[in-house]
């Protein structure tokens, strides 16, 4: 074996493994942690059990296993083997297995003690995939409860040792030096006036002209790869071959991208972040890093996933740059300004913080842990995402009301696939249904990229990798026969995707989903001619509120309801008919929020009518009720009481609170009310008073009275206002003898006095009556004596007798 940098720390690593159950290895790109260390551990430790090494990506797993086997002069399946979805290459003599993430989880679930395994390696842990975090949590549980002799080695080139050490405080940290080959890192922001694809192609072609060797170009997604590849064809020399590399490519095409270029040729590999892993691409000494990545972000509210393009972390930039120095000195050009790069996040955000957690929750429930806080996490799963996961699993019949697995849930968990697909598989009964469900699951796991949204076409094509995966899933169902039948597909999909049944709205390719969300097809898509679809594969867009339909099937809604009546929910309701100004009763059959059928009901009960009225009020607002001036003043008094007398409890009477509590205060007043006209006559004063007990009502009338009795004995209405102080409009003569400004609310709030002339015209507004009597009253007195000579205008109004009459009647 070739000497590699990680060999220098092998003695230290072996010693750490002897004394600690968990060990952290920080080894830069090219140190040999993936392609040398596993065999060294196998040779030096001579473990009694197998070594399992987790690789995050299938291409890397196969490639690493191949290289390890070659060093032993063997083929995969002998001493070294691999397992991944739809493919297994292990034998009775296999002692080192390279597995992908879902496979490791299945191994732990089927055999929690991991019998026959002595060491588990978690490679490229910096990627912090959801399955890697779950595997770590499960492995720690196994170590603590079942296997104190099981050992765990966590490895990465950019390990977040601080976080891991906080979780695993007893774990030794081993640091390996990387290769000596230097990499010159350059930073160059793309010109703002150029399109992204064109600017990347120009920068890449320029570097190829300046430097020898093959080049690895990191781009955020497949669309960018295809566009930049087309632009590069015109800009590179004839001896340069262009090779795309991304996860959805067939493994054979991925393999071609990582092989060395033929003699006399150079190559440009256009890759997503799949090439950041332990995958070695032969002959690369140049890297162009667009410094972008596309990540899936789950939206708990909609239950959909959105693809977001964002800046990569500094750890990813280091990983990408390291690709240039694997074999000789290299150059990495980051297409980002140096200052922007310095401001990038140190580590990528873990998948567990931004993913659909329904699969994780199903795995944990199968593990026997319904409370996720009991597990050891580097980052705790977000509560909103977990709540969305619970809702989905409950709707699929996997969880009972207590959050535990049902019998169906246990069947689904045994499938080891996405919960929606598992629900579809376990719903299949006949052999043909099972064969069709298995084919559908295989297609939806790796959907076609040709832009064809009609799922029937994919079913008809039946590509080899879909057939292979479908056979594997059929074996899990213990189904050895059966034929795929497209006519069964819609009903099977409804078992896992009933909320994604869609009805057309308008003629622009827009649909309404049963979950209430909108979805859309391209206007020229042939599927738009169908009123009903079932769309199992959706993607939430950044710019449109409607999700994009990626895969769908036409739906015969009547046939579906006839065969699967349990999907329908019947409900009776009474609703406002705005056009006729009446109430109408309906019986509806729905899937989610989509009405499949409805029929009128002739004799709704009074309680149904009243509930319809409350629903209508909530929909249209409180303005539909008859808010007279006296009722509005009562409501304002209650609002003011809460503000001025906060030491006492008062009911909330703002719009939101009243709408939320209609059943408490309005419903009791609706006896005998069966029409909208009668609703307008409901006594809202009594309705609001029902929110108060007797002591509260007495306190309100005492502290914030409706009226104030002025010195003449007249009871004058106080005018309350939400924004202004309470006001009393009263003729000036009736306030004679009142020396001070009246106040309410235990004397805390003085009234604003609007003093009127004998003809009830405004003379003065004041909040300090004593000051007015002493001052401005003199001017008013002079004017009023001339205008109203028959009325009394005393020199000392604060001590004069109040009056409602002229001098003649004094």
Image (spheres, grey):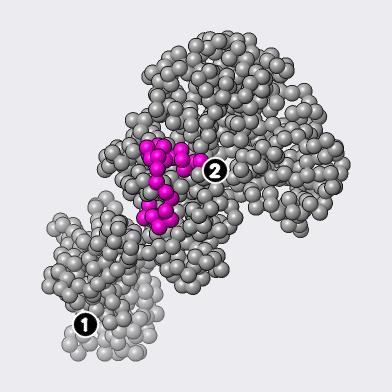
Name the one closer to the observer, 292 or 789: 292
Q: Earlier in the sequence, mark 2 or mark 1?
A: 2
Q: Which residue is mark 2?
A: 465
Asked if marks 2 and 1 touch (Cβ < 8 Å), the reply is no
Q: Nearer the viewer, residue 130 or 44?
A: 44
**Magenta residues, dominant SS class:** helix
Residue drawn at the location 75% of the way across and 34% of the way down: 260
Q: CA distance from mark 2 to mark 1?
A: 100 Å
Q: Which residues are magenta?
A: 468-492
Residue 329 position by quadrant: top right
Residue 688 in view, yes or no:
no
Instruction: Report the residue at 53% width, 10% height from top.
Output: 18
| Helix, strand or loop under label 2 | helix
Where residue 163 appears, as percent x and y from the top left, is 54, 28
**Is residue 474 one of those drawn in magenta?**
yes
How crowded is the residue under tag 1: few (<14 C-alpha within 10 Å), some, or many (20+)? some
Which residue in the protein does label 1 denote? 804
Quadrant of the image containing the N terminus: top right
Check the picture and name the quadrant holding the C terminus: bottom left
Could you tell me residue 333's position as x and y percent? Answer: 77, 40
Q: Is residue 411 magenta?
A: no
Q: Is residue 15 visible?
A: yes
Q: Circle 1 — which element?
A: loop
Q: Position of residue 700 (x, y in %)?
A: 21, 61
> x and y percent of residue 364 in the render?
38, 33
Q: Is residue 516 left or right of residue 571?
A: right
């Amino acid at each position: 074996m070739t000497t590699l940098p990680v060999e220098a720390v092998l003695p230290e690593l072996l010693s750490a493994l002897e004394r600690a159950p968990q060990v952290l290895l920080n080894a830069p790109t090219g140190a040999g942690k993936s392609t040398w260390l596993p065999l060294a551990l196998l040779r030096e430790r001579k473990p009694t059990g197998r070594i399992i090494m987790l690789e995050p990506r299938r291409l890397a797993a196969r490639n690493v296993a191949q290289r390890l086997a070659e060093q032993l002069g063997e083929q995969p399946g002998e001493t070294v083997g691999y397992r991944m979805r739809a493919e297994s290459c292990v034998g009775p003599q296999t002692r080192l297995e390279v597995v992908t993430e879902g496979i490791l989880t299945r191994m732990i679930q089927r055999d929690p003690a991991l019998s026959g395994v002595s060491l588990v390696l978690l490679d490229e842990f910096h990627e912090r995939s959801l399955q890697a975090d779950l595997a770590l949590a499960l492995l720690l549980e196994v170590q603590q409860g079942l296997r104190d002799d099981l050992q765990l080695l966590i490895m990465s080139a950019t390990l977040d040792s601080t976080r891991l050490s906080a979780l695993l405080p007893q774990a030794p940290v081993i640091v390996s030096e990387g290769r000596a080959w230097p990499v010159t890192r350059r930073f160059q922001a793309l010109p703002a006036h150029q399109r992204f694809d064109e600017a990347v192609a120009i920068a890449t072609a320029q570097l190829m002209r300046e430097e020898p060797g093959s080049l690895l170009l990191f781009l955020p997604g497949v669309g960018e790869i295809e566009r930049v590849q087309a632009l590069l064809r015109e800009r590179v020399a004839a001896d340069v071959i262009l090779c795309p590399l991304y996860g959805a490519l067939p493994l054979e095409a991925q393999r071609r991208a990582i092989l060395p270029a033929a003699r006399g040729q150079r190559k440009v590999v256009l890759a997503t972040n799949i090439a950041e892993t332990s995958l070695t691409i032969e002959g690369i000494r140049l890297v162009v890093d667009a410094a972008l990545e596309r990540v899936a972000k789950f939206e708990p509210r909609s239950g959909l996933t959105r693809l977001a393009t964002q800046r990569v972390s500094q750890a990813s930039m280091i990983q990408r740059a390291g690709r240039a120095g694997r074999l000789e000195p290299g150059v990495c050009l980051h297409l980002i300004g140096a200052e922007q790069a310095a401001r990038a996040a140190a580590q990528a955000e873990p998948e567990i913080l931004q993913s659909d957690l329904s699969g994780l929750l199903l795995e944990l429930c199968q593990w026997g842990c319904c409370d996720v806080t009991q597990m050891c996490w580097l980052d705790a799963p977000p509560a909103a995402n977990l709540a969305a996961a619970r809702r989905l699993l409950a709707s699929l019949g996997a969880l009972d009301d207590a959050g535990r697995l049902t019998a169906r849930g246990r069947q689904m968990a045994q499938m080891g696939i996405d919960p929606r697909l598992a629900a579809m598989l376990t719903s299949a009964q006949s052999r043909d249904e099972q064969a069709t469900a298995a084919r559908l699951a295989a297609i939806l796991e790796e959907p076609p990229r040709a832009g064809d949204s009609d799922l029937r076409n994919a079913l008809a094509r039946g590509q080899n990798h879909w057939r292979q995966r479908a056979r594997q899933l059929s074996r899990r169902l213990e189904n050895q026969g059966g034929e795929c039948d497209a006519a069964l597909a819609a009903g099977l999909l409804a078992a896992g995707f009933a909320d994604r049944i869609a009805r057309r709205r308008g003629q622009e390719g827009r649909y309404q989903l049963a979950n209430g969300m909108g979805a859309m097809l391209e206007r020229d898509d042939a599927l738009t001619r169908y009123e009903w679809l079932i769309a199992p594969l959706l993607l939430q867009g950044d710019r449109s509120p409607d999700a994009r339909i990626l895969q769908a099937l036409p739906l015969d809604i009547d046939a579906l309801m006839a065969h699967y009546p349990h999907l329908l929910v019947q409900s009776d309701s009474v609703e406002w008919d705005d056009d006729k100004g009446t109430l109408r009763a309906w019986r509806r059959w729905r899937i989610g929020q989509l009405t499949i059928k409805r029929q009128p009901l002739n004799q709704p009960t009074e309680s149904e009518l009243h509930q319809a009225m409350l629903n209508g009020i909530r929909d249209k607002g409180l303005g539909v009720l008859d808010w007279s001036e006296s009722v509005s003043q009562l409501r304002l008094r209650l609002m003011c009481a809460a503000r001025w007398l906060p030491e006492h409890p008062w009911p909330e009477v703002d719009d939101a609170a009243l709408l939320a509590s209609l059943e408490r205060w309005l419903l009791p007043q609706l006896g005998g009310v069966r029409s909208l006209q009668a609703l307008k006559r409901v006594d809202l004063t009594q309705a609001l008073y029902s929110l108060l007990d007797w002591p509260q009502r007495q306190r309100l009338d005492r502290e914030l009275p409706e009226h104030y009795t002025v010195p003449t004995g007249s009871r004058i209405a106080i005018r309350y206002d939400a924004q202004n102080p309470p006001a009393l409009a009263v003729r000036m003569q009736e306030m004679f003898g009142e020396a001070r400004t009246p106040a309410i609310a235990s004397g805390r709030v003085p009234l604003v006095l609007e003093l009127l002339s004998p003809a009830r015209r405004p003379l003065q507004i004041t909040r300090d009556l004593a000051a007015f009597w002493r001052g401005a009253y003199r001017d008013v007195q002079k004017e009023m004596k001339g205008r109203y000579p028959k009325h009394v205008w005393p020199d000392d109004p604060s001590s004069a007798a109040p009056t409602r009459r002229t001098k003649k009647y004094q």
